[in-house]
Each structure stands twice: as structure tokens, then as C-alpha cells.
Image (spheres, rainbow, N blue to C red):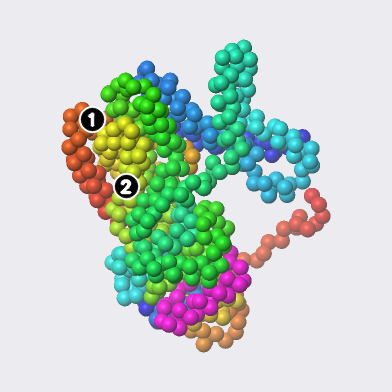
Amino acid sequence: MISCHNLTRRFGDFTAVDNLSFEIPAGSICAFMGPNGAGKSTTVNMLTGLLTPTSGDATVAGLSIVKGGLELRKRIGVLPANLGLFDDLTVAEHLTLTGDVYGLKREDTHLRTEQLLRALDLENGRNVFASRCSSGMRKKTALAMALIHNPPVLFLDEPFEAIDPFTSRTISELLSRVARRGTTVFLTSHILSTIERMATQFIVIRDGHIVWNAPASELTKSLEEMYFDLVEYPPVEDLEWLGSGPS
Amino acid sequence: MARLRPVLKAIATAMKRERKTFGSIATNNFFVASLLMADAVGFLYLLGALVVLFPLSTDPLRKIPPERLAIWPLSAVEHRRLRLLTPWLNPVTWGLAALAIWALRHTESFSLLALAAGLFAIGFFVPSVSGEPVFLRWIPAPGGAFVQLVRKSLREMMLTLDFYLALLLGVSALAYRLYVPAFPEEGRMVMTLLIVLALSSYAQCLFGLESKGGLTRYRLMPIEGWEILAAKDVAYLLVILVVTAPLSAITGLAAGLAALAVGHAASLQEGREQTRWRFSSGASFNNGVTQVLAIAGAGVTAYRITPLILLPCVLACAGSAWWYGRKLQSEL
């Protein structure tokens, strides 16, 4: 469902993503992990058409990300890193707009809006302008917008961050169910415990290169242990003045 | 006082930065073109001052989030001192104080003082001038993606001072027309053109109030670039239609279409970010001059010669929307 061939993106002299190649079959939940600045969001942005690759190509839901155009946008649901919300629309208006833009029938849009607001615990904030929402509400609104048109492929950039544990569990259960029905989910996250429970494939990226790509069945130890083995982290500087009495 | 000093300094810095955002007036078509209208410049700037008084009158203490203020180790006395001192970091307070002293000697100016003080008080105590006021929710959107995008654009327009200046001009003209039986015919045209002029700089920055998130969403939506631009145009023309209806709606529409036909290029190529509750800033002097000439040409022709000028105006605006919509699409 997602097929990536030598995908590369450079920003001037800096190569953010270098020759990325991987396959994600339909119905999978792929957790795309890596430290900050590793190239996760750049990859997601390329796969969703938000960023043009410097070289290489990928197919998503059978369409090239370079030539897919509007048809590609119809086949994917995206939770972008900056959430993609309009400040001057309320939570419910975002969902109605999305339903209409993707050509859903009015009744379907209404029904799905109500269900998503309920499922994601957004009912009380339905009439709040996005600019006035809490970060959790904004995240959930953007997630609902990605889901409402029932796309075959979902790209979710950090869906669990800023979300309370109950809603987080709701989301992971929701995603596991849609994946079992054939939807492909490609998500990035730093919440290792959550994605360990739900993902069927793991990809770890570091400095723009894939350092690990394996199905969940090949996980021989906890995801956290595996992650720290793969991703070097700098030693923590000791701030000696911190905790040494009032200054 | 030692602990208050850095707090006051921080507020003063924030206020100074905020005042800079009012500099958009310098590149706003209305205020630049008003300078050429020797007889009316005073009246037009007075209207502008009335509109700008609300956002200028904000309480400086709101620059510090209340949670932060509550966390800081300030005593109750220090909080009270802060409350008393911070209004004086707003230059409008000094202006009002000067006006009050002047009014003591010129008692006939009490009404002006009362009006200014009233407007200041509203701006000072109403907290919503920095966000979306409740009335924006009342704009209906019966259905369809396009209609909803139009509503969104209408809301954006209503977050600029250009809209309120145009509204004030429209209401003034309507009142004049109702109470002065011999409203000069030429006056209708001039007032209509002034209203379009007040809204013209906004046509040069149609995407200026979009957040980064909003622009990302446009890129993710399966809609053509011209549709996005057309929704913004329809919202713009709707406002013009309503505000100029008591004067000459045809003149307003022709001038508005001309403003948009010229403004699309700047909206896409310049991409100037705008600030809410401020006047829109135009892209460049050349663009402003071209736009003002186009507005005047289209408006005067529609009023004095023939309303058929609307046809070429519609074609020019539609052509420009299609062309720059394609550019928008490729950039998205």
C-alpha cells in the first residue's frame, strides 16, 4: 500500500532524508520512529504530497506521490505535524468542512461528525474556535479530520502526544480496528509503550537513514530497549546549580 | 519596587512591539490615498482613529498571562501597584489624560472626551479584541465545502480593521443619506469608492491571516487552487455588496472586482503575514497605485457611463483567479 523507492530530500547542503526505501503492506500499522530531527516529519511530508522529494519516488494507495495530485489527496487521511487547523473555524465546523470537501453526503458527514466527536471526547468543545482549543483538543480535531472520509491510508504525525491516557487508548483501539479492516496506518510517535502494543511493523530512522525495519514478530526485546540500542543519545549534562539550595 | 521593575520593563517591551504592528497603516491604500484628499483628510483620519482606538486601548497587564502573574512571587501590594502603573504604559492613557486636562479649559469638548474615554474603556475591559469574538459564529453556512470556505474567509475579513472602517463609512453614508434629503449624486459615488478603497489593501493579502496550519490544510485538501481563491473573492465581494448597498452596489462591485483582479498577484507572490485587529498592509507602492487606479477607473465608469463595465471586471477577476489559482495549486 505504501512503497518507497530511494526517497531523498535535501535542504541546500543538508540531506534530511537519504535514499529511503521500504514497503508497507495494506492493513499494517507501521510505527516510524527516530529522535528529533531524524527525518520523520520530512518523510511524512513527502509521502503526503506536502513536500516534493529531491529524488526518488513512492506510491501510496497505488498513486505516485509526485504525480498523484488531487487524486492522491482524496485517498489519504493526514494528521500533519502542525495539525493543519484553521483558527477561525470551530471544532465541529472543521469536520463538516472536511466531509464536504471529500464529497461525503450531508447525512454521512453529520453522522460521522457526531460519532467522532463522541469517540474522541470532543463533544463539549464542538463550538470552540480552533485558536481557543487546548493542544489536546486541537490534536483530536485534526485526527478526526484525518478519519472522517474513511481513507485507505492514514498518515499520523505524533497522534498520541498531548492526548490523555483514555483518549490515547481509544485512538489506538480505533486504529487497530481500522487496520484489521484493511486500512494502512503510518504513524510517527515517541510514546513507545503505546506503539509497541499496536504496531505491526517498526521502522527506525536516524540522520535520514533507516537503521531498523522489521515486523513486530521479530521484536526480541522490549521496544524501548531496542530503540535505545539503535539510537545513540548524548550524555546528560549535570546542571550542578540545580537542586543545590536556593539561589 | 525592585521586583516590579523587570515586570514593567517586559510589559513595556511587549507594548512597544505591539505598537509596531499598527505601522501597517503606512502601506494601507486608504490612508495613503486619503493624504491626496486635502478637504476630507481630517475626517477620514478621524474615522480611522476611532476604529483603531479599540485595539490600541488594550490593558497592558494582559500582556502577562494571568497564570504566570499568579505564580510569580509578588506580594498583594506589588500586584496593586502593578495594576495602577501598567495603564500608563499605554500611550492612549497619556493621550486621554492630556485631553482631559484640555477639556477642563474647553468645556465644550467634554462630549469628545466622553466619547474617547468610553471607547477606551470598552477596548480596555473587553478581553476579546485579541481573539475571535462570539458574533463570528453567527455567520451561516447552509452547506457545501465552497460555502464553508466563504464563511471562513468572511470571518477572517471581520478580524481586520479595514472591515470596520468600511462599515463605519457605509453607516455614516447611510445616515447622511437618510437625514439629508439632498444627498449629492456624486457623493454616492465618492463614498462607494472610499469604502472599496478601505477594503482594497486586504485584497493584496488574502492569505495574510492564514496560520501555517491553515495553509497546510489547503495543501492536503483535494480542491483546486482557483476554488480556494474564488471562496476568498466571494467573501470579499459579499462584504462590498452589503456595505455599499445603500449607496451604489454596482459601482462597489465593479471597483471590488478590479481591486481583486490586481490584488491576486500580490496575495500569492508577496505572501505578507498580517496581524489580527490591525489595518491590512499593502504589498508595494506600485501595487497600491495600480489598484487605486483600477478601482477608480472601474467605479467611475460603472457609476457615470455604464454598468456594463461589470462584465470586463468579472472577466478580469475570474481570469486572474484562474491564473493565480493555478500558481497556488502548483505551489501547494
A182 falls in the magenta region? yes
Q: Chain of mark 2?
A: B
Crowd rating for badge 2 (residues with CA inside 10 Å; few <14, some 14–19, many 20+): some
Tell me, for residue B303, which label it has, or none. Answer: 1
Asked which quadrant contains residue B129, the reply is: top right
Q: Is residue A133 visible?
A: yes
Q: Secondary structure at mark 2?
A: helix
Q: Amino acid at mark 1?
A: Tyr
Indicate the position of residue A206 as horizontal and vertical percent values.
50, 70
Tell me, for residue B154, which label it has, or none. Answer: none
Asked which quadrant contains residue A50, the reply is: bottom left
Q: CA distance from mark 1 to mark 2?
A: 22 Å
Give the residue drawn at x 67%, y 34%.
B86
Residue beneath label 2, please? B234
Give the residue drawn at x 32%, y 47%.
B234
Indicate the position of residue B177 as horizontal and vertical percent values.
35, 26
Crowd rating for badge 1 (residues with CA inside 10 Å; few <14, some 14–19, many 20+): many
Q: Amino acid at mark 2?
A: Val
> In front: B43, or B224?
B43
Magenta stretch in the rendered image: A162-187
Indicate the position of residue B218 as horizontal and vertical percent values.
38, 57
- What secondary structure characterizes most of the magenta part? helix
Q: Secondary structure at mark 1?
A: helix
User: Are the residues at dot 1 and dot 2 in contact (C-beta closer than 8 Å)?
Assistant: no
